[in-house]
Amino acid sequence: MSNDVSLDINQKSNPVQTVAPPKEDNNMLRATDKITALYCRLSVEDTKEKDGKDDLSNSIQHQRILLEKYAKDNGFENVIFLADDGYSGTNFERPSWKQVIDMIERDEVETLIVKDLSRLGREYLQVGYYTEIYFPQKGVRFIAVNDGVDSLVASSTDFNPIRNWANELHAKDTSKKVRAIKRMQAERGERYGGKASYGYKKRAADSKEIVPDEETAPIVEYIFKLCAGGKGPNQIARILQNEQILTPAHYYYRKYGKGQAGMDMQRPYGWSSTSVAHILENQTYLGHTHLQKSSTISYKNKTRVDIPESEQIIVKNTHEPLITQELWNIVRDVRSHKRRPPKHMDEPNMFAGLVFCADCGKPMVLYRTEAIKRSQFHLKCYTYGKKGKKYCTPHQIRESDLKQVVLDDLRRVTHFARMKERQFASYINAKNSAELRQEINALQRELDTMQRRSDELTALFKRLYEDNVLGRITNEQFRRLSAGYNAEQKTLEEAIPVKQERLAKLKASATNVEAFIEKAKRFRSIDELTPELLRLFIQRIEIGERAKKYSHSAAQDIRIVYRDIGVVDSNMEKGEQPVHMVTLPQSIDEIVKMLA
């Protein structure tokens, strides 16, 4: 009697479905009725020879022919065939293999036959457990045809540990080669394939090249603009849901007929904040290919872990972007200062992360509650609010007043930039060159002082150590003094690189008046101060204390620092040059030469 089951040899990456023989009423089979299981396994790597050509000798079809001939020649009956095609030998979570184990647990298998030990697996300990412990305990005869292994012949298993170890080394070596190949592909900007990111589609079904999807690309830009306008992922998700925009999973399902695990078919518009956040963090939309973001722990452990950011690969300008770098930067700035608005206030704080106390340097906090009118919402110094008047003063300003001040100044500066480009550029270059030079000099002096102190501490510690060795000071004195020196040295070691990085950025920076003028031209009429405009033009706002405390009518200094050009004072319109600006250098290169 034969229970052999047919196999579609062209089926890839799917387990071969089999039918087990019928069970007796007592759920046990007589020994003569037990199954002879012919098991095959094939991974993608197993199909390649050293020269890269297909190795047909390892194919599922070849393994089946070999095993069926062996079973027939040696009188094995009740044969069934099971195969896992496209599964690694280090992974024992294979569908057909788990079916074999289930049948063994039901005491339905008398003999298990494989082509060789590597078809059973390539994990040294796991394969050893099955062949040395599990199969003997369950009374299953195990045969590996090409390795000459038969558990009924004790001497045939003597070299099993060495074979298993060699098979695992092969798996380890293959894994290293695959990882190296994938990294080289990533460095060339080659996508691994699979689904294109939401907003894109494949140029062709079998292509790895992606192009904008005319249906979803505008939605991606819409999401970024909502965020630039101050909306958080939760708010954006609610907006998309209210506008009945299909989620990425449902859009893909309706367009290509392919679903994904965990997809809620009852909520086609059920956007989540996580999905929105992933879109806002995806550099694919800048036209870049971001690869090697995650990997498995090892060739044995397939759990995926994040790769450190420094080791990830970003290849720029590999496809058409959906958003501008400018919009991306604004979103990054908004997200870095994200704050959930109070439940009673749906509108987020547009000034979050932009407004600071001019005296203590801490952020200004927006106070708005249901108990006060909207016109009374105000910003107050964080230090004053937390520690009181001993540490700082309120620096209070109403939100509506600040919006009007910023709007008026933004109109003034952008109007001048549009109408008198050359005069504007000349003024900004001269002013910022002087400010930059002053800041570079001050920072260099700080660095020199810190470096000298670091050298002094090194010399002091050396002298202290010698005094201790020579007995001039006790061990207790050495420990106490050295602890203080070490603490100061550690502080300096942490601070010096930060200062050096800041100095390097200052020397490499220069005002970009042209970029500011181009932005100003895009907004010829600014009727309202929006969060997007605020982030686009303004880098920082500093609020001074009023000339007369607690007076709403007293003068108050407000310093607005614009992106690309810095502070713009009232001298600009008068055509005055900043003080000491008569013969200043016009470029950063000239500044660096003067400092050298």
Image: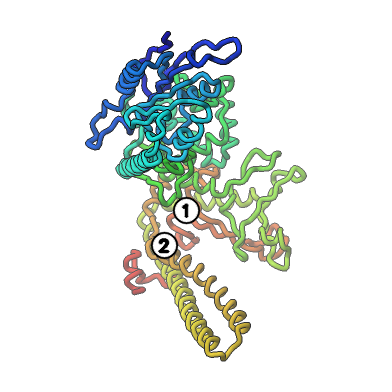
What is the distance, in whole Å, between disc 1 and disc 2 at their CAs? Answer: 26 Å
Q: Is residue 356 above or below residue 98?
A: below
Q: Which mark is residue 315?
A: none
User: Would residue 122 appear left or right of 274 to someone viewing this image?
Assistant: left
Judge from the rendering whether residue 278 lies leftward or rightward of residue 11; answer left or right: right
Relative image position of residue 244 (x, y in whole percent): 55, 23
Q: Quadrant of the C terminus?
A: bottom left
Quarter of the image where the N terminus is located = top left
Is 324 or 154 nearer to us in this picture? 154
Residue matched to label 2: 505
Q: Residue at x 36, y 35 (%)?
A: 192
Q: Is any part of residue 238 visible from this angle?
A: yes
**Image spot of residue 442 (x, y percent):** 47, 73
**Residue at 49% across, 39% down:** 303
Q: Residue 243: where, in percent of width, then height?
A: 56, 25
Query: Which one is in front, 275 or 466?
Result: 466
Q: Quadrant of residue 37?
A: top left
Q: Residue at x 40, y 18 (%)?
A: 81
**Residue at 52 percent of width and 74 percent of height:** 489
Q: Which residue is mark 1?
A: 413
Regarding mark 1 in the picture, which secondary structure is present there? helix
Q: Nearer the viewer, residue 420 or 61?
A: 61
Where is 578 relative to 541, above or below? Answer: below
